[in-house]
Image (cartoon, rainbow, N blue to C red):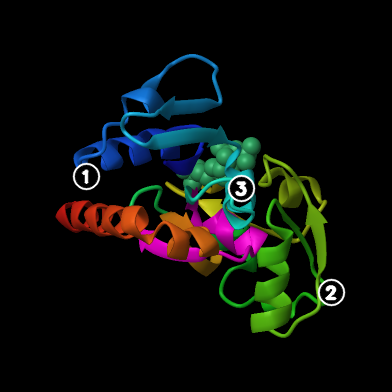
């Protein structure tokens, strides 16, 4: 039996579709009830429906053998696990964004910046690790774009998908931090102990991704 942690929502739906195309019967996972554990003993699969940011935790501790989660969450959580496949969907960018006046190098001129983000670890790693700049990070939980508009922060670090939220609020991308997409992660012990089940699954998933 393999336990797979899915990120509740769109990523879970796309992951289930991909697994079905890879030849795995995921009827159990398509249950529209509010059950959080969906299991099919005959098929040998158990799905747990988790909050996206918790998926790496379930996988690191071995509560799930595998997980499907966005690269943004993996970067932010920094868990000990194997990242084995890029699924190619859930594509977006992690960006530094702010008022258009701060584009073209102007942001760099602001000392001791305040940066709002749902991703404080990614923000710190980028500004302090990559740009060697010390910054004040303000953690928010949503509608991050509000922060520079209302004077809470100079800029933000957030996910940009279509760019519409930024545009409609007079903001723009200043720098790209990372390309994001859905990834398959595997528990380090499961990778060895359940290699007979996990390795063929990874191969079949990769074959499907190559067809997309
Ligand atoms: C995400 C992200 C941006 C928006 C980007 O927010 O934080 O606000 O989507 O998408 P776009 O480039 O296509 O406009 P989400 O919808 O997850 O809500 P949140 O503000 O509560 O984080």
41 is higher (above) or lower (below) than 73: above
Eye-nearest disc, 2 or 1 = 1
Give me the disc on residue 112.
2
8 is higher (above) or lower (below) than 95: above
Q: Provide the secondary structure element on which disc 1 rests.
A: loop
- Could you tell me if the residues under marks 1 and 3 are in contact, i.e. CB atoms within 8 Å? no
- Residue at 45% across, 65% down: 192
In the figure, is residue 93 to the left or right of 87? right
Query: Mark 2 packing: few (<14 Cα in 10 Å), some, or many (20+)?
Result: few
Give me the disc on residue 184.
none
> Where does residue 131 sit, x and y in percent of width and height?
67, 83
Query: Mark 1 packing: few (<14 Cα in 10 Å), some, or many (20+)?
Result: some
Residue 180 visible, this angle: no
In the figure, is residue 53 to the left or right of 147? left
Q: Specify the quadrant of the image occupied by residue 29.
A: top left
Query: From mark 2 to mark 1, how far is it between C-alphas?
Result: 50 Å
Which comes sooner in the sequence, label 1 or label 3? Answer: 1
| Magenta stretch in the rendered image | 69-87
Query: From mark 3 to mark 2, how far is it between C-alphas?
Result: 37 Å
Residue at the disc numbered 1: 22
């Amino acid at each position: 039996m393999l336990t797979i942690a899915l990120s509740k929502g769109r990523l879970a739906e796309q992951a289930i579709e991909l697994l079905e195309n890879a030849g795995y019967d995921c009827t159990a996972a398509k249950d529209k009830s509010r059950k959080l554990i969906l299991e099919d003993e005959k098929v040998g699969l158990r799905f747990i429906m988790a909050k996206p940011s918790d998926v790496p935790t379930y996988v690191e501790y071995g509560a799930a053998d595998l997980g499907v989660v966005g690269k943004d969450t993996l970067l932010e959580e920094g868990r000990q696990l194997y990242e084995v496949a890029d699924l190619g969907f859930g594509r977006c960018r992690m960006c530094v964004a702010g008022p258009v006046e701060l584009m073209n190098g102007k942001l760099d001129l602001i000392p001791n910046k305040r940066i709002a983000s749902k991703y404080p670890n990614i923000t710190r790693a980028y500004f302090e690790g990559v740009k060697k700049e010390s910054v004040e990070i303000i953690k928010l939980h949503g509608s991050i774009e509000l922060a520079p508009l209302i004077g809470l922060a100079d800029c933000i670090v957030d996910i940009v998908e279509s760019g519409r939220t930024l545009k409609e609020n007079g903001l723009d991308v200043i720098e790209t931090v990372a390309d994001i997409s859905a990834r398959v992660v595997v528990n380090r012990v499961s990778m060895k102990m359940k290699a007979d089940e996990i390795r063929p699954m990874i191969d079949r998933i990769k074959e499907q991704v190559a067809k997309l």
